[in-house]
Amino acid sequence: MAGFGLALFGTSASAERIKDLASVQGVRNNQLVGYGLVVGLDGSGDQTTQTPFTQQSIINMLAQLGTTLPTTQTLQLKNVAAVMVTANLPPFARVGQQIDVTVSSMGNAKSLRGGTLVMTPLKGADGQIYAQAQGNLLVGGAGAAAGGSKVVVNHLSAGRVVGGATVEREVPTALGQGPFIHYEMGTTDFGTTQRVVEVINRDIGPGTAQAVDGRLIRVAAPEDADLRVAFLGRIENLEVRPAKTIAKVIINPRTGSVVMNQTVTIESCAVAHGSLSVVISTEQKVSQPNTLAPGQTVTTTQSEIDIKQGGGSLIQLKAGVKLSDVVKAINALGAGPQDLLSILQSMKAAGALRAELEII
């Protein structure tokens, strides 16, 4: 089995801006979604007989434009595709502002390349229309098919319209309540939250900031809108040195990736690793008589089973070692992704891995 390399990336603790660690409560994006049609495709649209919703949408759209078709009409169109349109409405967005939208195929369209999104209303969670989207799609891919062969580069069933939606309704965003604003930390960490409070009080003045809990900070701010904006701009650029996070190992068994942070350590333990592989190969053989000889053609199946036992190795790991030693030891075992997952789980069960093990 090929060895699995676990890379080590050294990082040193450095100061970060408060805007990178926390956000102002209430200042957030809002998701918008809409259903629409993309037209102008080069024969790569939905097969309307297999996607009845596309056909019904076309009939409804034509009716709104003054062309009436019977609902029983069967349309054989290749240049139209039904799509879902999504967008993020940023905070403080004003009427007339343009935002980007993402367009994704819903049916069996082969490609949205070269298509044009027809005017599509975008609704929020409350069912109200907040933007209207329309424009030419930009699809970052290419594809071709002929004679049963097909070549596709990147993904052709989704694209973007840059500045393709115009905001039609504003979302009121309250910048704090009364004389206070609240900062929400990106993660719950009591140490980092306390450091943020200390930095604000040291730079602005004692008593300006107060920690409500491990994630929320209440800050006394000017009530005048102009002064409050300047005040927030000053705070968000203050630098804080975050506290060390908990020791954590993140494993993704689907991709075989393993990531550890700098605080991971291990206790004294011995790890033995050996691989066992079973390979079964089946081959069909045909036996037929010579020309004009009696008998008939016979097909036989011949199977071969090969069992390989990898050489096990025993490595001793001393207590209190750092991440670099953990990386070297695991790489020395020559473990594959699945083997590495088993080793780390066993070390955690044995109490030798001083870290939280998270599988995603």
Image: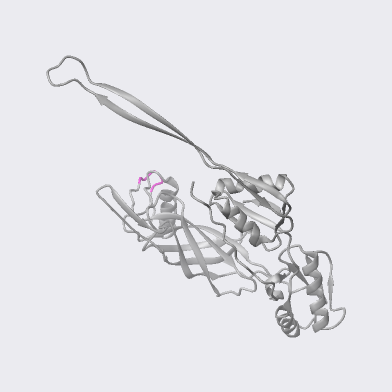
* Residue at the extreme right of the image, as rendered: 207
Nearer-the-camera pick, 85 or 168: 85
Q: Residue, x 67% and y 44% (percent of image)?
A: 346
Lateral position of residue 163 relative to residue 128, left or right? left
- Within the magenta stretch, is there residue 350? no
Residue 334: x and y, percent?
54, 50
Which SS type dominates the magenta stretch? loop
- Between 211 and 219, the one lying in front of the other is 211
Q: Residue 181: in sight, yes or no? A: no
* Relative height, residue 290 to residue 263 (above, below): above
Decide which of 360, 269 is in the foreground and name it: 269
In the rendered view, tell whether residue 105 sits above or below residue 92: above
Q: Residue at x 61, y 47 (%)?
A: 341
Q: In the rendering, at what x and y percent does residue 210 appear? A: 85, 72
Q: Quadrant of residue 246?
A: bottom right
Q: Is residue 279 left or right of residue 34?
A: left
Residue 275 in the image: x percent, y percent? 54, 41
Number of marks in the rendered image? 0
- Whether 117 is drawn above or below 219: the answer is above
Displayed quadrant of residue 170? bottom right
Q: Which stretch is magenta?
A: 70-74
Residue 151, x across and y down, in percent: 33, 54
Q: Is residue 297 left or right of residue 189?
A: left
User: Can residue 287 be seen at all in this image of the molecule?
Assistant: yes
